[in-house]
Amino acid sequence: MKRAALPLALLLVFSLLLGGCFGQKTPEDIVDDLGSTLDKMGGYKSQAVLTMQTSSTPMEYDVEVWYEKPTNYRVALTSKQRGITQIILRNNEGVFVLTPHLKKSFRFQSGWPENNGPLYLYETLARSIIDDTERKMNMDNKDYVFEVKANYSGNRSLTKQKIWLTEDLKPKRAEIMDSNLDTLVKINFTEFVFNPTFDQDAFDKDRNMTTSSMSVIPTMAQASQPSQQPNSQFGVIVPTYMPEGVKQGDIEPVTRNGQKTIVLQYNGAYNYKLIESRPTEATVSYEQGMPVDLGFTIGVLTQTADNQRYLTWELDGVEFTLTGDLPEVEMVQVAQSTYGLGGK
């Protein structure tokens, strides 16, 4: 009897092991499920904390994303250091970058986020997993952990990313690394809901420019206080970063439409200029362009037919426009080096 029971026991153990192997999903199964989730979902809401290691001091953002299929987006980025919220809004009127506390908005025609989706969008993370045929997958308890290539045009130093998904394919966290595997950007999702309901005016520009309608954003309570309008006078702000082979040239004060404007010239390996002013227009429109995360604010990048790039951003009431033949990654570094500087 004992000799007969032993083969039966071994067969039972083998059957259980074999059944477990067949029951476990492969990376290809997860990728198929992920693609199906993207196709079927009607939208989502998410909350996350984004950390960017762009300098010696990490920059942190609270990030709230609303997405309603097919093209409505509302991304609220609140700087923890500055206590200021900016909003990227896409609706049937176009793409906007809103700064409610300054009552300032940029409007432009753009394919964002399809052309340059940031990692805090679920579809950006999902597509990076789906599109990388060399992806690797591991399990961390019940979470799926993918290692895939990073492809962010604004920062070519970002080469690899790790993405954690829950069992029901919700994003949990992600890390983006450079070629030395140092983590430069990370995001931790604190809330994620598929197929939520949205108010009829959730993606309306006027609603999102009105702070009283945005109690979901903590810093709006601070921003609802009357904001001081900056005067036209300001000191020259000189970026601390210059690309190799570039020298600073003249600094020229210019008056345009009755407003003081400063132009800083740079020449050498790249030729470009930085224009600084305090504009009074409430809305600035661009025919084309895309939002660019600078770490401390959102910029607008446009490019002309003759390959000239324009990067525009605003900081503490001063509007900066960087233009010339600089590559995008160099433009971003120059822009980032203006943060935290006082005027001379």
Image: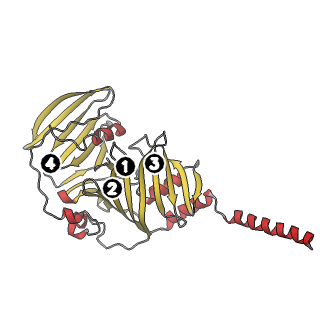
Contact, CB < 8 Å: mark 2 with mark 1? yes
The earlier-in-sequence mark between 4 and 2 is: 2
Q: Where does the image place residue 239, in percent across and percent down from the top left?
A: 24, 37
Query: Could you say where residue 281 lies in the image, as x and y percent from the top left?
Result: 15, 52
Any part of residue 210 in sight:
no
Above-or-below relation of 270 to 180: above
Q: In the rendered structure, find residue 279 and report the number of the disc placed on it.
A: 4
Task: Decide which of tag 4 and tag 1 comes sooner along the chain.
Answer: 1
Q: Earlier in the sequence, mark 2 or mark 1?
A: 1
Q: CA distance from mark 3 to mark 2?
A: 16 Å
Question: Which three-letter amino acid code belongs to the residue tagged 4?
Answer: Pro
Does residue 24 appear to the left or right of 273 in the view shown? right
Quadrant of the snapshot with the C terminus: top left
Kindly identify the residue that appears in the image at 17 percent across and 35 percent down.
263
Q: Give the Cα distance between marks 2 and 1.
A: 9 Å
Q: CA distance from mark 3 to mark 4?
A: 36 Å
Where is mark 3, residue-wise? 176
Q: Position of residue 150 (x, y in %)?
A: 48, 47
Q: Amino acid at mark 1?
A: Met
Compared to residue 309, the image places residue 85 above or below, namely below
- SS for tag 3? strand
Farthest-out residue, front: 2
Q: Which mark is residue 52?
A: 1
Decide: is 191 above or below 112: below
Residue occupying image coordinates x 24% and y 30%? 266
Q: Residues within 10 Å of mark 1 (few under 14, many from 20)?
A: many
**Residue type (three-letter) at the residue carrying disc 3:** Ile
Q: Nearer the viewer, residue 50 or 257?
A: 50
The kind of secondary structure element at disc 2 is: strand
Residue to which mark 2 is pinned: 61
Res. 281 visible in picture? yes
